[in-house]
């Protein structure tokens, strides 16, 4: 019986710690003032059909490679964590870094390049165009 109470205590403590950490990370990153609502519209994470970049994701990767200046990136850092919303018109909105580290030129350039990308085909949920949040890691390989 004591083991069950001890487990329950640790479970509640761990859950509270995780939720508190998530809440604090949302406070420190202005990108997430309210991740479920943006410009008065609900932002979904799961939809029937996800947004599509013109020509597909390979074309989006090509766009990033051709427009990113990776010399601005720290050689010790292998991944940028960028998040953005594709709105109902297919426009990139609310693009920012998920990293809580201080902003540096590599993050800024990645955000700038993604914001300037062509409009996407919007996401669909039950046949309706909806806003969706994309979490997009950019892997950086230095050779």
Image: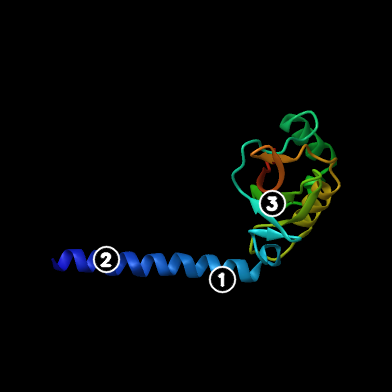
Q: Nearer the viewer, residue 100 or 57?
A: 57
**Residue 9 in the image: x percent, y percent?**
28, 70
Spatial CA span between label 2 and label 3: 36 Å
Q: Does residue 80 appear left or right of residue 66 in this picture?
A: left
Local crowd size for mark 1, using a 10 Å CA cut-off: few (<14), some (14–19), many (≥20) = few
Residue 76 in view in this figure: no
Quarter-of-image position of residue 55: top right
Task: Please say if the residues under marks 1 and 3 sit with CB atoms less than 8 Å apart.
Answer: no
Query: Which residue is situated farthest in the left direction here?
Result: 1
**Residue 77 in the image: x percent, y percent?**
65, 51
At a point 19% along the width and 64% down the height, the residue shown is 4
Spatial CA span between label 2 and label 1: 24 Å
**Residue 61 in the image: x percent, y percent?**
75, 35
Q: Nearer the viewer, residue 90 or 4?
A: 90
Q: What is the secondary structure assignment of the residue under circle 2?
A: helix
Quarter-of-image position of residue 48: top right
Q: What is the secondary structure assignment of the residue under circle 3?
A: strand
In the rendered view of the protein, which quadrant contains the C terminus? top right
At a point 58% along the width and 67% down the height, the residue shown is 25
Residue 136 vertical position relative to residue 14 in the rendered view, above or below: above
Q: Give the label on residue 24, or none.
A: 1
- Residue, disc 2: 8
Residue 94 vertical position relative to residue 26 in the rendered view, above or below: above
Q: Earlier in the sequence, mark 2 or mark 3?
A: 2
Spatial CA span between label 1 and label 3: 18 Å
At a point 76% along the width and 60% down the height, the residue shown is 39
Residue 40 in view in this figure: yes
Q: Earlier in the sequence, mark 2 or mark 1?
A: 2
At a point 79% along the width and 37% down the height, the residue shown is 65
- Residue, disc 3: 82
Q: Earlier in the sequence, mark 1 or mark 3?
A: 1
Task: Please say if the residues under marks 2 and 3 sit with CB atoms less than 8 Å apart.
Answer: no
């Amino acid at each position: 019986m004591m083991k069950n109470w001890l487990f329950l205590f640790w479970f509640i403590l761990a859950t509270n710690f995780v939720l508190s950490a998530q809440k604090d990370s949302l406070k420190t990153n202005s990108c997430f003032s309210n991740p479920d609502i943006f410009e008065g519209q609900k932002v979904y994470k799961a939809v029937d059909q996800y947004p599509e970049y013109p020509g597909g994701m390979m074309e989006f990767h090509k766009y990033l490679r051709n427009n990113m200046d990776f010399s601005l990136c720290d050689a010790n850092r292998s991944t940028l964590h960028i998040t953005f919303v594709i709105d109902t018109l297919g426009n990139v909105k609310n693009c920012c870094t998920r990293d809580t580290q201080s902003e540096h030129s590599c993050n800024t350039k990645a955000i700038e390049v993604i914001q300037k990308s062509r409009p996407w085909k919007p996401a669909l949920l039950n046949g309706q165009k909806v806003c969706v949040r994309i979490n997009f890691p950019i892997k950086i390989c230095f050779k």
